[in-house]
Amino acid sequence: MQRAIESLGANVIASLERTGRTFNLMLLVLWELVQPPYRFYPIVRQMYFIGARSMVLIVASGVTVGMVMGLQFYNILERFGSVDLLGSGVALSVILELGPVMTALMVVGRAGSSITAEIGIMRITEQIDALECMAVSPHKFLIGPKLIAGVLSVPLLTALFDFVALFGGYFVGVVMFGIGEGSYMNGMIDNVEWSDVRLGLVKSVIFGLLVTLICCSRGFYMHLTKAGSEGAEGVSSATTDAVVLSSISVLFSDFLIGALF
Amino acid sequence: MGSSVESSMECKLKSESGFDLLELSGEVDLQFSPRLREKILGSLKTGNPLLIDMAKVSYIDSSGIASLVEGFQTAKSSKLAYGLLNISSTALQVLTLTRLDKIFNLYSSPEQFKQQL
Amino acid sequence: MSDASQTNNAISIRDLVVDYGPRRILSDVSLDIPMGQIMVIMGQSGAGKTTLLRCMLGLKKPASGSVNILGTDIVTASRHDINRIRKQMGVAFQGGALFSSMSVAENIQLALREHTNLDEKTIEIMTRIKLDMVNMLAAEHLMPSELSGGMTKRAALARAIIMDPKLLFFDEPSAGLDPSTAAELDQLIITLKNTMRMTIIVVTHELDSIFKIADHIAVVSAGRILETGTPQQITSSSNPEIQGMLNRKPRETIVDTDAHLRRLVGG
């Protein structure tokens, strides 16, 4: 029993250490990024990697989610005789919750895990050491562009998700179930405030930062996690950890932000 | 280590009869080689053959050598003569290491160069 | 040992103590590496020579001691000063450590792009000169994943010397190379010392290379420096451990064949 408590305590301490390191990493990277020289091309390249390559996935999942929401809301609203609220229902749930959260989770799977693996492999093959020995800061050169790209790409992808999801809801409501087009559209426009859009945007920015930061950190600090996790095994466990942790962080911070605002 | 007057590079371009003479002295390194490159390419643009006097060069690194190489290639494509004068043994060692000793035309006097024109 | 600032030492290490958590890896290590010479740090795996190298590169902070490189103690120096020293150092890592997302040429040029304002053409020519020096001109646009082991090492060397550094570090240069490529590399190391006046530090356990290239040898064992000296001095050392390392004692012949048979087959 005592051992169980001890190992639990050790795990908690290890988790706190990792969180502290990750937070530290963010501060270090931001500090280095604000110093000249400024390089924009690497950011663009990372935005392509994170953003452009995820677009098909985002569109596919967005349309599907929109259609599912259209279906479910229709079923529920029909019972209360308020199917004219379908547009508002789909729009609000997508813009406030599903858009930011689903997009972030898709990005975790599509880009986040690759980021962890890429940086993790660089760490164990001494490429990060090589950068340091060349007097090139790995924070500024390697992680910085990824962080900025994450903060910029995820909101853009979220907007794309929102757009196609609303279309999916439209398809189900208007085309499949025959709700008036005007009713659907007006429902959207009338009941969605700018504060809702703003909240969705804030969420997507924070999610973008969280996901990229956690995935970078897991790869970057791979060598400091439990000894014996070197090599390919270490990379795959770091990647899994990163995916799990960033997903949970997205969901948890989604609640926090929603509760606070 | 600051850059004292002795360790900086000087290059003076002189007009001789039939060619330009670039007198190089000091240390040609990452800091100063861009200036050398400018001078060489600028001189070649005027259409004169170029002889570079390396007697007073105490140190030349790969950026300096790269500038010399680029000058040579530019001169060749403009069909202008191009040579290095009085190259020191240390600089020659570096050229040998980089396999460029056989590429450049090396001279020990301006008259030798003039004869090639 | 004399004060580093007075003698012509490229690197002076004093009383270095390094721990990894509870384990003490290096104890009271002191070493001088003279300018313009090839110093080979040899020892068996686990002796601590890689840790010593990492301390010299500023990648590992010691628990105590000083590492004076070109006049600056990098243990206490600021990040800015450490980076200033690093620009005069080149490192060829054991696995090459080439950046996987960049071509060979881009790998070599990175330091130039980050630290200088040289013209594009100059950078290109400098890259090609270094590639030619290691006989890899044809590989200019290849990606690291397309290189063989020997090519990777040579590309890593070209990258390490792109800025004509004063100090050059090798971590196990011959590891994984066939004898003729290893011999070529040894020759290149000697030429670099002679022509470009580099101070070269080689960490290795490859005996053949050591005696061909070393001006000085430091023998590391169990986290301490057993002995330093010229190759002749080391070869004639009275220390039995060193003699053991050098002679590669063969395993004892099997005396009791019955017992050995039983060990293998069991029962």
Image (cartoon, rainbow, N blue to C red):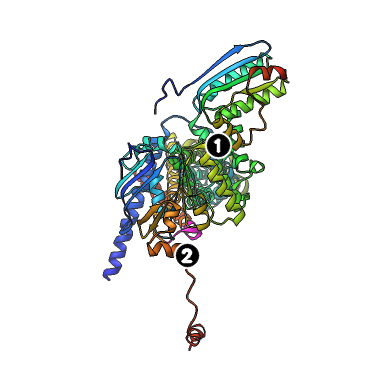
Along the line of sight, which residue is nearer the eye, C203 or C249?
Answer: C249
Residue position marked by numbered label 2 in the rendering: C247
User: Are the residues flagged by discs 2 and 1 in contact, CB closer than 8 Å?
Assistant: no
Q: In this view, does B39 lie to the left or right of C228?
A: right
Mark 2 or mark 1: which is in front? 2
Which residue is located at x 41 percent, y 61 percent? C242
Instruction: Identify the main secondary structure in magenta.
Output: helix
Judge whether C219 appears above or below C267 on screen: above
Give residue C10's quadrant in the image. top left
Q: Which amino acid does label 1 sit on?
A: Gln
Q: Is mark 1 on a helix, strand or loop?
A: helix
User: Do marks 2 and 1 both belong to one polypeptide chain?
Assistant: yes
Q: What element carries label 2?
A: helix
Residue furthest to the left in view is A2
Q: In this view, does A75 lie to the left or right of A261?
A: right
Q: Position of residue A103 (x, y in %)?
A: 51, 46
Which class describes the residues within 10 Å of circle 1: few (<14), some (14-19), or many (20+)?
A: many
Q: Where is residue A150 in the image (x, y as percent from the top left)?
A: 48, 41
Work out how far the residue at label 2 is from the one at label 1, CA to CA, in angstroms.
43 Å
Q: Where is residue C196 in the image (x, y as percent from the top left)?
A: 52, 37
Q: Which mark is residue C88?
A: none
Determine the chain carrying the residue at label 1.
C
Label 2 vs 1, first from the N-terminus: 1
Q: Which mark is residue C109?
A: 1
Judge whether C15 appears above or below B99 on screen: below
Which residue is located at x 31 percent, y 60 percent? A10
Judge whether C93 appears above or below B40 on screen: below
Residue range corresponding to the magenta coloring:
A228-235
Whether residue A234 appears in magenta in the rendering, the answer is yes
